[in-house]
Image (tube, rainbow, N blue to C red):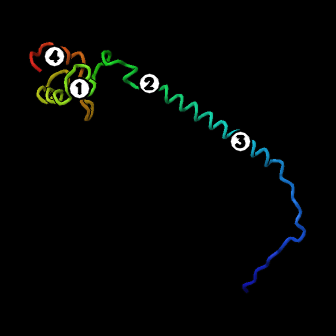
Amino acid sequence: MNQVNLYVERNITQKEVPAIVPLAYQAVGMLNQKIGEAQRIAQEFNKKQITYEERVPLWKRYALSIQEAAKYFGIGEKRLYQIIAEHEEEDFILEIGAHIKIKRELFGQFLDKATCV
């Protein structure tokens, strides 16, 4: 029952390569070349991408993050958090979900009225 048939070709002659094989190698080479070009273009694009900070300067923004407000107003981040905690009902605080933003112009007016920060 356990019989294995083994057929051996006695007259081994070199067979022709189908005409499509060289074309396939050529197509693969062209694809690799195009992929390389696309990767170079993507790298150049990533180098040229401008961050949000570079597009819109701080002095033109409506609201600033705590880090941005610290840079803009020259007040430390810890002190800004304290001011926000002490003045929770002020108009210069903007809550976006869990994030806190400071309305630039209104906070500037608040600082103009303040005698001590």
Question: How far apart, in angstroms, are the residues tagged by discs 1 and 4?
Answer: 17 Å
Say which residue appears at 79% left-offset and 46% top-offset: 22
Which residue is drawn at the image coordinates 17% and 30% (left, top)?
Answer: 78
Looking at the rendered image, the disc whose residue lies closer to the viewer, 3 or 4, is 3
Quarter of the image with the N terminus in it: bottom right
Q: Residue at x 21, y 29 (%)?
A: 77
Element type at marker 1? strand
Location of residue 33 with respect to 89 vertically, above or below? below
Q: Which residue is mark 3?
A: 29
The three-letter amino acid code for the residue at tag 1 is: Leu
Identify the residue under disc 1.
94
- Indicate the amino acid at tag 4: Leu
Nearer-N-terminus badge (3/4): 3
- Whether the residues at callouts 3 and 4 have beta carbons within 8 Å, the answer is no
* Residue situated in front as seen by the camera: 84 or 58: 58
Whether label 4 touches label 2, CB < 8 Å: no
Which residue is outermost to the left? Answer: 115
Q: How far is the residue under mark 3 from the one under mark 4?
A: 65 Å
